Image (spheres, helix red, strand yellow):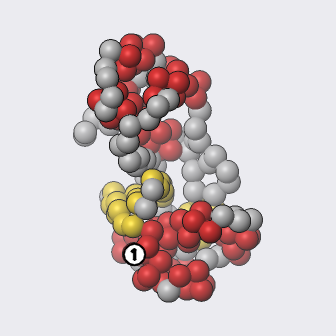
Amino acid sequence: MLDWKLATRNDLLQEIGGEDGAKFLQVSERRRLAGITQAGRRDEFIASRWLARKTLCANFGGTAGDWDIAAEHGQAPLVTGPAPAYLSMSHSGEWIAVAVSDGAVGLDIERVKQRKNTLALARMAATPRESLALEALQEPARSALFIQFWTIKEAWLKSRGSGLDFDLMRRLTNEEATPSWL
């Protein structure tokens, strides 16, 4: 089983009534939220946790308060609740996405936008062959292809419970990271 949802941060916050409506957060999440000082990042945290719980409840049952989402920095979230479940979350700009499954799952979203530093980013995350392909392109095609490489690799890493690992990303080809069902 696999389900995923995409929503805007503002729509999700409106559903719960803003930060005051975040009573569904568990103790560990409240501690993490207390350490986030930037308002936009706080809103993103609350909205992503709300979308995750809505999706978990729809697929595995229970109420928002029945689910606990613990996430160490750079690690996949650990979900506990009424049923065994796996979760992946991503955000880009106003958009928040979550995927839930009964097995390991990875998801990444990124806005396609022209970047001044695409080739520098590619040196951090692309194989030599991918870097050559990017160098041969002009913007905006270069940024679009880079985002394709990046999101597939980041989702692959997330599905294995890992955070960003640039050394592995430079070795991992896009073909290796792409699921067979895509």
- Residue 110 drawn at (x, y percent): 41, 46
Q: Nearer the viewer, residue 12 or 121?
A: 121
Residue 84 higher or lower than 90, as above or below: below
Q: Nearer the viewer, residue 11 or 151?
A: 11
> Local crowd at mark 1 within 10 Å, few (<14), some, or many (≥20)?
some
Query: What residue sits 68% from the left and 54% below the top?
Result: 72
Instruction: Tell me the residue that label 1 is attached to.
Output: 11
- Residue 8 drawn at (x, y percent): 39, 67
Task: Report helix, strand or loop for mark 1.
Answer: helix
Q: Nearer the viewer, residue 141 or 108?
A: 141
The quadrant of the image that shows the C terminus is top left
Total tally of numbered discs in the picture: 1
Q: Nearer the viewer, residue 131 or 48?
A: 131
Query: What residue sits 56% from the left and 70% below the top?
Result: 43
The quadrant of the image that shows the N terminus is bottom left
**Residue type at numbered disc 1:** Asp
The image quarter containing residue 78 is bottom right
Q: Is residue 97 visible?
A: yes
Residue 155 higher or lower than 172, as above or below: below
- Residue 121 drawn at (x, y percent): 51, 28
Horizontal side of 49 relative to 59 (left or right) equals right
Q: Is residue 24 visible?
A: no
The image quarter containing residue 9 is bottom left
Horizontal side of 134 relative to 25 (left or right) equals left
Residue 109 higher or lower than 30, as above or below: above
Horizontal side of 56 relative to 18 (left or right) equals left
